[in-house]
Amino acid sequence: MRKRVAPQSGVQHHRARENLLFALPRTPSSVHMPCAPALIDSHGRHISYLRISVTDRCDLRCRYCMAEDMTFLPKSEVLTLEELALIAERFIARGITKIRLSGGEPLVRRDVVDLVRRLGSHVGCGLDELTMTTNGTRLATHADALYAAGIRRLNVSLDSLDPALFRHITRHGNVARVLDGVFAAAAAGLAIKINMVALKGLNEAEIPAMLAWCGDNGFDLSLIETMPLGAIDEERIDRFLPLTDVFATLSARFALSRDAHRSGGPARYWRVAPYGTRLGLISPLTANFCDGCNRVRLTTEGKLYMCLGHDDQVDLKTVLRTHGPAALDDAIDTAMRLKPKAHDFRIEAGSAPAVARHMSVTGG
């Protein structure tokens, strides 16, 4: 057991000041409206998982995710934390049992812990789990506050442990700062899963060492195939690494046994001996998982995307601001009817991205 670290000054600030978002009375139209029917799409899939991008901004510029020069949304187009909470609470009333907060980088948004605290109050009362995906750069400051607010598990994006390679992939990141955040989160009691995008010719040789490092520290590891989302500054085909090849390499070095564990997302899991940790594979191109999709994604500007790989969306921000929370149900039902059967991801030389928006807009 690692010794629990003392709260950082930023955490003390969160605890000391009045929590305005959480203190706001929840409107009858958002929380106390009668529960509507569960969310079932036109293909018979039960939708139980909502991913919320709380910001499109990020303090890193990962090469596979974003262009170096990005234009971000003006504040007027972004949902307030109160609006995000109202929409999320309506989804909980419709049967959503898991919510993941993401970005961009969620911890760059001011007062985001207030949103975590409000949504965390629903855990055990309709919501089974509230989680977050973060790049870890600000975790050392926020880890204790996230735990206190109701989060028990984090996904941390970490594509290399090598300082120079990490800086190259992220364009300017400091891996030591991320590792400080990871261990602060673990000391705060948060379970850690490392997310690593498998990149041919960049970090593929490091994947076995990453799996061993995660095992040594009690962290799970999920490997992710790069996805064709948004224009970036290089050819994705040059970095695409099929996870079928990676799994064959890892199987020759580690004792891997299939694990029935489900985290609510698309990963398939294997138990890693002798560590007892898990290896997850998220392979949208080599092992399509759309048949069992249970997810929808809300962007920070209030657009509900039913599929990561399609542009179809429903504008919940306009509905909320024009007609109020009571009108959200009809808009959500429309989204269920529009949810496609599968994405159209392809990575080929010279091919355009599946959609123009970057992953940082939709959220991971």
Image (cartoon, rainbow, N blue to C red):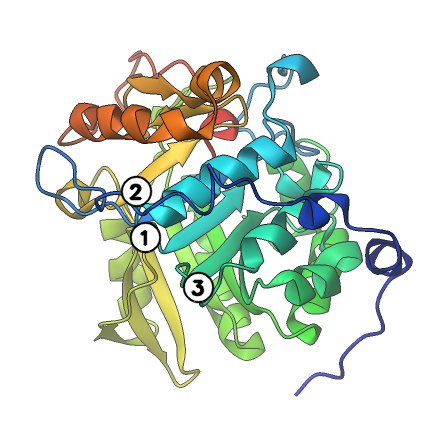
Residue 109: % across, % down: 70, 36
The residue most toward the left is: 43
Local crowd at mark 1 within 10 Å, few (<14), some, or many (≥20)? some
First in sequence: mark 2 vs mark 1:
1
Residue under circle 2? 295
Q: Is residue 113 above or below residue 285?
A: below
Q: Looking at the image, is mark 2 or mark 1 nearer the viewer?
A: 2
Q: Is residue 349 above or below residue 102?
A: above
Callout 2 secondary element? strand
| CA–CA distance in space, label 3 to label 1 | 21 Å
Residue under circle 1? 265
| CA–CA distance in space, label 2 to label 1 | 8 Å
Q: Is residue 199 visible?
A: no
Callout 1 secondary element? loop
Q: What residue type is disc 2 on?
A: Arg
Residue under circle 3? 125
Q: Is residue 100 visible?
A: yes
Seen at 26% across and 43% down, the residue is 36
CB within 8 Å, label 2 to label 1 = yes
